[in-house]
Each structure stands twice: as structure tokens, then as C-alpha cells.
Image: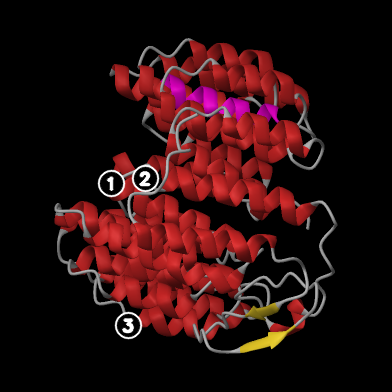
Amino acid sequence: MAGEQDPPDERISQHIQAFRDALVAGRDQTVHIYYIDGNRDAQRSIPGRNIAPGEPIAERAKLGIPGEDYRPWASRLLLAGVHDAFTLTGFDKAVALAIIASAAARVTPEQVWWLVDEADTAAWSIADVSRRAEALASIAEEIAIVDSGRAEAIARSIEDVYQRGRGLAIVAERLAAVDPERAEAIARSIEERHFRGLALAAVAETVMTADPDRAGWLAVQAETAARSIKDALSREYALARVAERVAVVDHERAEAIARSIGPILRGPVLARIAGMSVVGHERAEALAWSIDRPWARAFALSVVAQRLAVVDPARAWWLVGEAETTARSAEKAHQRGRGLAMVARNAAVVDLVRAEAIARSIEDVSLRAEALVAVAERVTVVDLVRAEVIARSVEDVRQRGRGLAMVAERLAALDPEQAEDIARSIEDALSRVQALANLVSGHPA
């Protein structure tokens, strides 16, 4: 199987041996805790306790002792993931190591630092500046909860101001749920106004329940930051993303923002607003029908159908038909495929057979793969066997890996060994690492 060869140098071999030793050392050990400020020196001895780094102290106290079978199972998956990660190069290697670091924090947090170091080194080895920045932002995203201080430092090390803004916005978004004040401070420090607005909107969305007044104020500031962007196209993209975020806080403001931008971006934003639970069913359907672009209107109608699947299944079924017809009426092949892919994803909640048929009818190979993976994800709720069959039928190897990773994750609670077999069968190494990490992170300890 790919990924079982030895890592390339002695230093890494020593790290992996230390990692292996830590995994098999047993449950009674000193656990290094990565506090939210990224302090790697704090430690305390907690026999048999599996600490999730980055969680508030009060939450950590609630965690119980892992089951007898969890640690050896998780250890086996983590070691396989580490070996797979070291078979990769460049961007994929950097992201894979960060993914494993995040999952490993659940089992052996004292060993996370070297995985993050290796991910950072892999990212900086990428010659293309844009791709390197993307890799660093992805690392920051993966480890933000594990070690937020390190994640922020990695994001701030990105040379390109746009990509640096993206990285910091990701960190702020990840931190918003556990430390909204720090998340807001990071958001405000972002120079690039597009991502500053997006980060502020993400914090607003998170604090909405606890502090609606503050959420509303942050939503206004997010819109202001987006509207201050000079380049018209960049401004519209920023406003579109801010509108989607603030919809939970103030859906009327979100709709007003969406209607202030051009038709290409307006449609998808209105469709997502229609999918918000804060918007009534009748208003949601009216929003959907008001969209002029066929592919975006089809997307919106399928979103409303998904919402009505339980409360009004007959109406939902009819809306799926209208959405499919509307998507097929789009003149350009790519827009037609995009619309059908979105319809297939949402229609799966209403009619699985029809959703799969819609997905398979898409001409574009990439969009067809995307749609089938989305359908497979929805099918995992009711039929894991069928979901696996659909995922394995996807032609694109990475998309197929994504689909199988979702099936494995859903199956883990019922049959961990079978879930592991599915994860290990994934051909694409990065997708396989993601699947193995998801099993470790998602399985109840």
C-alpha cells in the first residue's frame, strides 16, 4: 500500500519513533496542554485523561477517560497518516501534516509541535509564492484550535497581504467559538479589507446568540469594511461573502447587501439566504423565484425544497422538479452543470434516486464528480452501503477520496474497523490522510 515506505531522513525517523513511543506509552502520562495563547510549556499530570487542546478549562474537566480500545485504534490510524503524509511533497505534504497534527492533539498533544514544524517547513519549500501562501493559510486553519498562537504566527508570516488576510481570517473564524474577543482582535488587525470584513462577519455570526447587540454592531462594521474596497469586482465579492455571513444576524440587512451587488454574485447569495432557518418558508421561496439567472434560481429553489422536505414533502418534490427544469434551461453548459450539481446536492434530502440521476446526467466530469460526492454525503444518513457505492463510482480520484472519507467518518460510530478499511482503501494519499484523521477526531473516545 502507498505510504508504508520509510521517511527520507534520520531526523524525521527519530521524530516518528518518539511519536510511536508516545502513542503506545499508555494512559498514565504527563499531558502538555496547548492553551489558547499557544503556550507550549504549560503542563500538568492527568492520569488517563484525553485532553482536547484549545478547549476552555471548564470543558476539559468534563472529558472522561477514553475507552480501552480507542487509543490503540487511534494510534494505528495516526501512524498510518504520518507515513502517508511523508510520501507527499510540497502543498499536499504541508496540508497532510497539519491535518494529522490537529487529529494527534486528541491522543498525544505533546507530540503535535514537530508535526506542525514539518508542515511549516514543507510549505516554505514551495517555490511558487502564491501556492506557498495558500499552504501556510491551510496549515493555520488546521491547527487554529490546537495551537492558536502558532496558527496566528504562521498566518502573519505570509508575505502576500491578500493571502495573509485570508490566513488570519481563517484563524479568527476558527477561534470565534472559543475566544470571540481574541478572534475579533485578530479580525481588526487584518490589513486587507475583504478579509477583515469577512472575519468580523464570522465573529458576528458566532456571538449572535450570546450577544445579539454586539453581533449587529460587528455586522455593520463588516459591511463597512467591504464597501470601502476601491476595486469594484473585489468589493462585490467581499460584499457577497459578508452578506452570507451576516444573514444569521440580520437576514434583512443581508438581503439588502445582496441586492446591491451585480447579478452574477447576487443569485447565489440570495439562494443561501433563502436556506437560512431565520427566513420564513414563503419568503424563502419568493426570494428564490426573484433570482434572474437560471442556474442560481435553480440552486435557490432546491434549497427551499430541502427545507420543506419534512414539513411539506409534496411541495418539496414539486420544487425539485422546477429546480431541475430551471437548471437545464441555462444556455451555457458550465452554468447548466453548476446548477444541476447544486440541485442534486439539495434534492438528495427529498428524493435520493432522482438526485443521483440528476448528478449522473451532468456532462462536465468535474462537476459530475462534485455532485455525486455531495449526493453520497447526504445518502450516508440513510444508507451507508449505497453511499459507498456512489462514492466509488466517482471518476476523479481526489473527489472519490473525499466521498469515501465522508462514508468512513459516518460509519466509524457503527463499525470502526470497517470504517478504517474504507479509509485505507482510498487511492489519493492526501484524501487518505484526511480520512484517517477524521476517524481519530470524530470517534468518541
**How is the model colour-coded?**
secondary structure
Task: Work out whether residue 405 or residue 242 is closer to the camera in this orientation and state it.
Answer: 405
Q: Residue at x 57, y 83 (%)?
A: 35
Name the residue tied to disc 3. Answer: 189
73 versus 349 height, above or below: below
Observer-nearest residue: 436 or 161? 436
Q: Amino acid type of disc 3?
A: Ser
Residue count near mark 1 (Cα–Cα under 10 Å), binned few <14, some 14–19, many ≥20: few
Residue at point 18% right, 54% down?
130
Q: Is residue 172 above or below residue 56?
A: above
Location of residue 41 with respect to 311 vertically, above or below: below
Q: Is residue 370 magenta?
A: yes
Q: Which residue is mark 1?
A: 262
Alpha carbon separation for disc pair 1 and 2: 6 Å
Graded by Cα atoms within 10 Å as few (under 14), some (14 to 19) or many (20 or more), the crowding at tag 2 reads: many
State the quadrant of the C terminus. Answer: bottom right
Report how far apart the C-alphas of labels 2 and 3 lie in the structure: 29 Å
Horizontal side of 117 relative to 180 (left or right) equals left
